Amino acid sequence: MLTENGVQVDLEAVEHVLRRADVLAIAFTLFPERLLVDTRANAEAGPFAGVVEPVASIQERYLWLGRHRGMFGAPEAFSFFMWPHTVRSLVRRDVLRTLRERLEAAEPGAGAQLDRALEELLQRELEAMKAAVRGDPRRWKTIWERRARS
């Protein structure tokens, strides 16, 4: 997949990860939060899909999983990747279809968690774009500042 900046995503490799990973984190370019999906389920707890804060290392993510999903132990196949395009493109192309199907297979209705998380990420992306246009100093450095009117 090509974009205006030439970044190409190997969708077959992404599909392989989506089929294989029991826990998956996806990062985005415009904001720090991650999409975290844990496809594991048992009689006590279903799968999880949600927006989480970033962590500094894989060890910290494993600690997070231990606190929030400890009943499953360590994941057998943890994957992480940066999606170089917009969340909107991820949704529009239905890139996560396989993941949604896996969640639904684990627990009927669990795909809705993924949809809610994606809606939240779309909102965060929109807010990040607005902040960039405004030159929000907390996240963006303005190159050309408007002169004060006399």
Image (cartoon, rainbow, N blue to C red):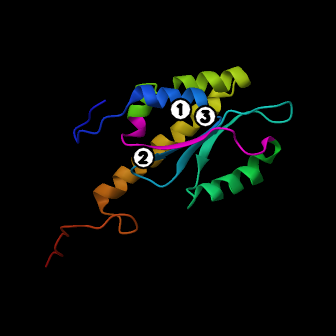
Figure quadrant of the N terminus: top left
Question: What amino acid type should be assigned to the residue bearing mark 2?
Answer: Glu
The answer to whether 40 appears left or right of 26 in the picture is right
Q: Which mark is residue 17?
A: 1
Tell me which label, 2 or 1, sits earlier in the chain: 1
**Which of pointers 2 and 1 indicates the residue nearer the eye?**
1
Q: Nearer the viewer, residue 131 or 67?
A: 67
Q: CA distance from mark 2 to mark 3?
A: 25 Å
Residue in the image at 38% along x and 40% along y = 86
Amino acid carrying label 3: it is Ala
Kindly identify which numbered label has been placed on residue 150: none
Q: Identify the secondary structure beneath mark 3.
A: loop
Q: In this picture, is 140 found above or below 20? A: below
- Residue 87 colored in magenta in the image: yes
| Residue tagged 2 | 125
Instruction: Indicate the position of residue 69 as horizontal and vertical percent values.
Output: 76, 45
Find the residue positioned furthest to the left.
150
What span is colored magenta in the figure? 72-88
